[in-house]
Image (cartoon, rainbow, N blue to C red):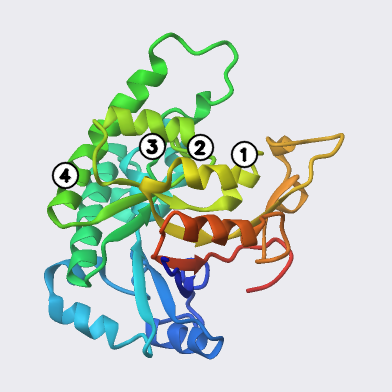
Amino acid sequence: MSQIKGPAIFLGQFMADEAPFNSLPNATAYMKELGYKGVQIPAWDKRAMDAKLAAESKTYCDDLKGQTNGLVITELASHLMGQLVASHPAYDELFDAFAIPEMRGNPKARAEWATQEMKYIIKASANLGLTVTPSFPGAFLWPFVYPWPQRPAGMVEEGFKELAARWKPILDYADEHGVDIAYELHPGEDLHDGASFEMFLEATGNHPRVAINYDPSHFVLQAMDYIGFIDHYAERIKAFHVKDAEFRPDARSGVYGGYQGWTKRPGRFRSLGDGDVDFGQVFTRMTAIGFDGWAVLEWECFVKNP
């Protein structure tokens, strides 16, 4: 019987300029006091780590491990870098905020920079003895997810062809270093459900390093069968975010949220246990498929303070 490791926590929502979240030693000391055994590090955040240095120096990686107060580094998250590998021009201004200043306003240079950053994170993961990086795939097609007028024939295929072309060199590099890229299937990304994941998988030639970061919260917000998903994609699930969400549609709005602010949308992320996810069933099915990676809490809540 497999045994899921944990509990661990993703530091992405916590790193800040104020203590205790202003450095990896301070943040991990805080999390250790709360009982966590591992941390997933946002590899884009210099307050936590320098991905380029980690890619170039195993000594730096050893030092990084020494800064965690005994907590295990579970994965290096690469979501923001993955997002910038592929982005529709409609989102250029929004996503520029994720890039270093000298790359802003230049989508081509920004994508090339993000591709190199992904390679740093992959090599850094290998240097740390890690075998997976959770990431985002980016999006060319999201503006056309619910189209009117209908999409021209071939647009979706062309979008996935280009997305795969952007990712293929990164995936090949990951394969050379024994690292899976576990895409978080997320509304706003071209890979947001099982059907779109399969399109990308086919476009990459069923690349062996294409994997899934399973996060049931995103499927609750799409009214999907998030338990059945586990069995269906068992072989590709390589990482696990434990995040809760609620979906409370009413007479005014549903899945799309009516352009309302985060606190008024029917679908919202919640603190663990406050939402709709049946984690008893989630952990049962994840154990049944043999998942033996880390259960990593990702905290987001529109009510409670971190």
The residue positioned farthest toward the front in the image shown: 1
Q: Dot 3 corresponds to which residue?
A: 87
Using the numbered discs, state the Cα–Cα distance from disc 3 to disc 1 in whole angstroms: 25 Å
Using the numbered discs, state the Cα–Cα distance from disc 2 to disc 4 in whole angstroms: 24 Å
**Quadrant, the C terminus:** bottom right
Q: SS of the residue at dot 3? A: loop
**Residue placed at 47% from the left, 77% from the top?**
17
Image location (x, y in percent) of residue 201: 33, 34
Please rate how many residues cluster around mark 2, counting C-alpha atoms within 10 Å: few if below 14, some from 14 to 19, many from 20. some
**Residue placed at 26% from the left, 71% from the top?**
50
Q: Amino acid at mark 2?
A: Asp
Mark 2 and mark 1 in contact (Cβ < 8 Å)?
Answer: yes
Residue 86 sits in which quadrant? top left
Please rate how many residues cluster around mark 3, counting C-alpha atoms within 10 Å: few if below 14, some from 14 to 19, many from 20. many
Select label 3 or label 1 by which is in front. Answer: 1
Using the numbered discs, state the Cα–Cα distance from disc 4 to disc 3 in whole angstroms: 21 Å
The residue nearer to you, when weighing 273 against 142, is 273
**Quadrant, the N terminus:** bottom left
Q: Dot 1 corresponds to which residue?
A: 224
Q: Dot 4 corresponds to which residue?
A: 172
Q: Dot 2 corresponds to which residue?
A: 193
The residue nearer to you, when weighing 282 against 303, is 282
Mark 2 and mark 3 in contact (Cβ < 8 Å)?
Answer: no
Select label 4 or label 3 by which is in front. Answer: 4
**Residue placed at 87% from the left, 34% from the top?**
251
Horizontally, residue 6 falls left or right of residue 148, namely left
Using the numbered discs, state the Cα–Cα distance from disc 3 to disc 2 in whole angstroms: 18 Å
Mark 3 and mark 4 in contact (Cβ < 8 Å)?
Answer: no
Horizontally, residue 121 falls left or right of residue 265, namely left
Say above or below: 14 vs 146: below
Using the numbered discs, state the Cα–Cα distance from disc 4 to disc 1 in whole angstroms: 31 Å
